[in-house]
Image (tube, rainbow, N blue to C red):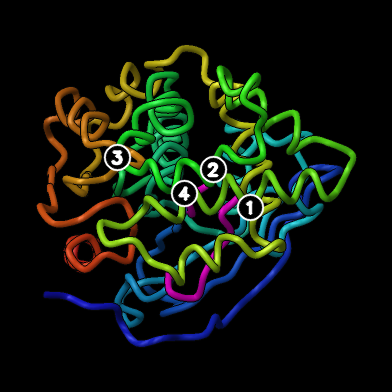
Amino acid sequence: MKDLYPPIEPYNQGKLKVSELHTVHYEESGNPQGKPVIFLHGGPGGGIAPMYRQYFDPQQWRIVIFAQRGCGQSTPYAELRENTTWDLVSDIEKLRQHLNIDRWVVFGGSWGSTLALAYSQTHPDSCKGLILRGIFMLRPSEIGWFYQEGASNIYPDAWQEYIKPIPPAERGDLLSAFYKRLTSEDAQIRLEAARAWSVWEASTSKLIPSQASKVSFGRAEFAEAFARIECHYFVNKGFLKSENQLLDNVERIRHLPGVIVQGRYDVVCPMITAWELHQVWTEAEFVVIADAGHSVSEPGIKDALIRASDRFAAL
């Protein structure tokens, strides 16, 4: 089974001003002359981690990672204004041009898969291929499953902690109830809601729950941007024109090589979404990991993604 490549440090880091308000942080690692790949992190609002560099052979790849608007080292922190799917699509294209890259492979999981599809369908000529994991289309049914009712029946213990900040009278619309608190002017109210929201995701992401993930996701510096930006996107239905937009526009990327990696027991982004993408994009390779949930770090998912990146390096 494939494991991560050894840790590496970036050979270049920078800031790119993408609007009057926003500046995004980016890094490059691996081989400056290698095949370019853009890694799109999850959330939205999840930020970047050094581990993400390790999914690619550093001798073969020029690895570009950036922190999306409002999170990580991008500024302003946790900002919701001018923060939409299409702003991020524009940022990715600006970054490609800034780095003088002709075309690149697009690698994204969870929300990163949503953004990868949106970007590649908007700019197919900028893409060499897609490696996707834990497919998420940001449709109302998917949001409802995880944040209103569905996953709650599998993780009732974690769910009980998730809903604690919300009074019973407001639990009929948890998304709106959280959004009200995550946009409150009271920092304590924001943080309490943000921690509950973030730890819920950490509690359900892996087939075997990780206490370390819950601690990490519950840290104030991570939780507020993650929860605020996620909820902002979700109440706005991803800023998509229709709920099936990303499925309906697969024709724009059909010519590109693609791999879809999906954990069978993914509770955050259940397999039905990946299956539906596979049904309309039959040319893409579809890999189901029988003993995995949602997390990019689970052994089977890690193995499949690294095998895919190794193959794509040879294309």
Mark 4 = which residue?
201
Identify the residue at image location x=53%, y=72%. 28
- Going from N to C along the chain, the mark reached first, 4 or 2, is 2
Residues rendered magenta in the picture = 41-52
Q: Nearer the viewer, mark 4 or mark 2?
A: 2
Q: Is residue 93 left or right of residue 244?
A: right
Q: Relative to residue 85, is residue 299 depicted above or below?
A: below
Identify the residue at image location x=12%, y=30%. 282
Mark 2 = which residue?
162
Q: Is residue 46 magenta?
A: yes
Which secondary structure, mark 4? Answer: helix
Which numbered tag is attached to residue 195?
Answer: 1
Q: Relative to residue 223, is residue 3 depicted above or below?
A: below
Which secondary structure, mark 3? Answer: loop
Report the front residue among 7 and 281.
Answer: 7
Q: Is residue 44 magenta?
A: yes
Mark 3 = which residue?
154
